[in-house]
Image (cartoon, grey):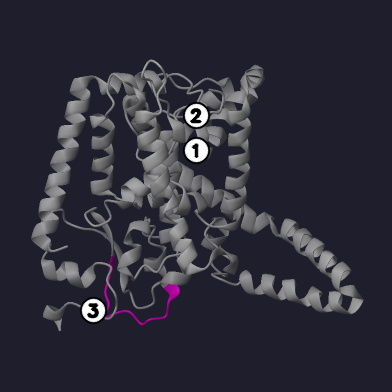
């Protein structure tokens, strides 16, 4: 493994995890889902159990199912599994093991690599519209603008072969910080409302709820489940109602968002990421920041697929521990390391955990 | 989080996880999860 770059190692782990979660590849050919006994085990990442290849249960779907069942109204098993994954890996699950995260990175990579003609057509249409509204002279002036912007936007992180496969960003990825930070709270709202409260309290006459996040929002169900099943069983289309078309619209929005913005779903919408984010202080896999070694170049912030500043403590819950910042840090100030669960001094904690560069550990001075 | 606190939090969450998984298995939740997972979830694929 030593000759592989950090990027390649992560991609290998991601692909292996996706394959292990979706080992029943024959299901894509038959259009039938796997029905073996292994499906009682929750996989760590977001992976729809209606995907024909899935061999495990989606923790989010399982949690909602148990909460919606009047026999249980609580799921010790799923909560225990989530706590175990959160304790060991935290949001490293998102960065390393989640098949839906990998899917987004691949889709983003395709867009960066092959989406340029679409972007040019889009820019050309806009230019033509502006020329039409401003007249010939104004239109000439407007024609220069978009090209400049496009050129500037594509330079971020260029020159790395790994970037071509999904992590390269454009300047358009960075919305305004304050507003963008607020948008990230949507996933906590989804977690509270659609994953917990609605399955518990929005029940029918017999006391049964429904997995409302899966039913109304989750694009993974459509992309991983509905698409392969409907291709092999087109007769099921007759069951499609307004919910199906609502979810189809959500998938279109998701695909557009994921093409324009790296890890769009993870940043703003994923309740599973919100759950794992709650474990960011105690999880064994930590991104450590050494304030003394930091040269303040800001490369970590520029390359981060989650658009956060990995040096600042307020972003810890958003960090998916992909390690991209650690790989690019010129001073070696950031390190992605598993920590010993019990043996760790308080001084090391203060010094090495993500902390503002202005506050190094006093004992080490 | 200081070292001792961190250690306590990790041990507590670890015990919580193990005991919750055991309680869930004892309550038969795994059977319900399996029953849901081996059938096509019509809600998930937008047909329910």
Do the residues marked 1 and 3 share a common chain? Answer: yes
Chain identity of mark 2:
B
Do the residues marked 2 and 3 share a common chain? Answer: no
Q: Residue at x 38, y 15 (%)?
A: A206
Could you tell me which secondary element the residue under label 3 belongs to? loop
In the image, residue A251 lies at what x, y percent?
Answer: 59, 41
Q: Which residue is mark 3?
A: A359
For residue B46: magenta?
no
In the image shown, does A34 or A4 lie closer to the viewer? A34
**Numbered badge on residue B44:** 2
Q: Which residue is mark 1?
A: A218
Q: Residue at x 49, y 64 (%)?
A: A179
Q: Height in image: A299 above or below B32?
A: below
Q: Residue furthest front?
A: A205
- Quadrant occupied by the C terminus of chain A: bottom left
Q: Which residues are magenta?
A: A288-299
């Amino acid at each position: 493994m030593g000759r592989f770059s950090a990027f390649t190692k992560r991609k290998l782990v991601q692909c292996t995890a996706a394959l292990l979660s979706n080992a029943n590849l024959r299901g894509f050919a038959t259009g039938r889902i796997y029905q073996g006994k292994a499906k009682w085990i929750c996989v760590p990442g977001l992976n729809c159990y209606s995907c024909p290849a899935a061999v495990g249960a989606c923790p989010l779907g399982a949690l909602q199912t148990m909460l919606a069942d009047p026999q249980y109204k609580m799921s010790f098993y799923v909560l225990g599994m989530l706590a175990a994954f959160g304790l060991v890996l935290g949001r490293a699950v998102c960065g390393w093991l989640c098949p839906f995260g990998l899917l987004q990175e691949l889709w983003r990579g395709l867009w960066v690599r092959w989406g340029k003609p679409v972007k040019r057509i889009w820019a050309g249409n806009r230019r033509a519209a502006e020329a039409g509204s401003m007249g010939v002279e104004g239109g000439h002036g407007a024609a220069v603008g978009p090209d400049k912007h496009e050129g500037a936007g594509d330079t971020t992180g260029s020159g790395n072969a790994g970037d071509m496969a999904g992590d390269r960003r454009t300047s358009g990825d960075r919305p305004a910080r304050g507003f963008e930070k607020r948008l990230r709270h949507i996933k906590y709202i989804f977690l509270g409302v659609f994953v917990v409260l609605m399955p518990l309290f929005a029940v029918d006459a017999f006391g049964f709820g429904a997995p409302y996040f899966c039913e109304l929002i989750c694009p993974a169900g459509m992309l991983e489940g509905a698409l392969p099943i409907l291709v092999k069983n087109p007769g099921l289309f007759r069951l499609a109602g307004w919910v199906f078309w609502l979810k189809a619209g959500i998938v279109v929005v998701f695909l557009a968002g994921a093409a324009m913005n790296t890890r769009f779903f993870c940043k703003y919408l994923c309740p599973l990421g919100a759950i794992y984010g709650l474990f960011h202080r105690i999880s064994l896999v930590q991104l450590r920041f050494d304030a003394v070694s930091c040269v303040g170049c800001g490369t970590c912030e520029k390359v981060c697929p989650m658009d956060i500043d990995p040096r600042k403590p307020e972003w810890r819950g958003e960090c998916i521990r992909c390690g991209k910042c650690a790989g690019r840090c010129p001073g070696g100030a950031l390190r992605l390391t598993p920590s010993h669960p019990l043996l760790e001094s308080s001084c090391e904690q203060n010094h090495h955990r993500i902390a503002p560069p202005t506050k190094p550990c006093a004992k080490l001075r | 989080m200081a070292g001792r606190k961190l250690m306590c939090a990790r041990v507590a969450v670890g015990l919580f996880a193990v005991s919750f998984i055991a309680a869930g298995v004892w309550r038969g939740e795994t059977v319900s999860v399996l029953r849901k997972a081996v059938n096509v979830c019509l809600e998930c694929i937008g047909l329910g």
